[in-house]
Image: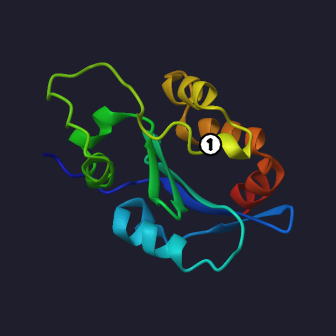
Amino acid sequence: MTVQKPRAGFAVAAVLENGGWRCSELDPNALTDLDAAITELGKIVTTGAVVALLSVDDEFFVLIRLAPSGTELVLSDAAAALDYDIAADVLDMLRAEMPDEDEEETWAEGDLGMMSDLGLPSEELEMIASDIDLYPDEQLRMIARRCGFGDQFDDLLDRL
């Protein structure tokens, strides 16, 4: 497997508390290490929903949500696991098969219904993730808008 460190990207936590959203930047190590991303997300104390949105190297995105039943994950492009450790780790945690080396098709992997209680049905998340004409930051902005924290997400990205 070829391993590339991300050259670009961002890691953001979106937290729903008392009916309002706030977004904050996560440690940049979250872009290369799934365990680091989950650990960073776990440090956030809240009674509401908390979601990590990772845009990795303008290639793919990862959504992480900690839930009582365990960690929920979405990887926008399963084929990214051939080139990126964090994507391979997501597939491993999901117990999904690695794509073939010659795979040219892209597809999302994970719990596409993980954001449905926040206003984003699984079908819509799948459509966003499968749109190859969009960059990951554009896809994540769409997800943020649909879930109700688009302004907070945009404000944070403008500062990064």
- The single residue placed furthest to the front in the displayed view is 69
Could you say which is closer to the camera, residue 49 or residue 56?
Answer: 49
Question: In what quadrant of the picture does the C terminus appear?
Answer: bottom right
Q: Note whether residue 160 is visible.
A: no
The colour mode here is rainbow
Quarter of the figure with residue 50: bottom right
- The single residue placed furthest to the right in the displayed view is 19
Q: Is residue 102 left or right of residue 116?
A: left
Quarter of the figure with residue 159: bottom right
The three-letter amino acid code for the residue at tag 1 is Leu
Could you say which is closer to the camera, residue 37 or residue 10?
Answer: 37
Which residue is depicted at the point 31% across and 57% down? 5
Q: Is residue 71 left or right of residue 152?
A: left
Which residue is depicted at the point 26% across and 42% down? 81
Which residue is depicted at the point 69% across and 56% down? 157
Q: Is residue 95 above or below residue 39?
A: above
Q: Is residue 112 left or right of residue 106?
A: right
Percent coordinates x, y for residue 111 in the rendering: 47, 41
- Mark 1 falls on what kind of element? helix
Q: Is residue 123 above or below residue 47?
A: above
Q: Is residue 128 above or below residue 74?
A: above
Residue under label 1, please give it. 140
Which residue is depicted at the point 72% across and 46% down? 118
* Tally of numbered tags: 1
**Crowd band around label 1 with a 10 angstrom C-alpha radius: few (<14), some (14–19), many (20+):** many
Percent coordinates x, y for residue 142 in the rendering: 69, 36
Percent coordinates x, y for residue 30 in the rendering: 44, 66
Q: Note whether residue 120 is visible.
A: yes
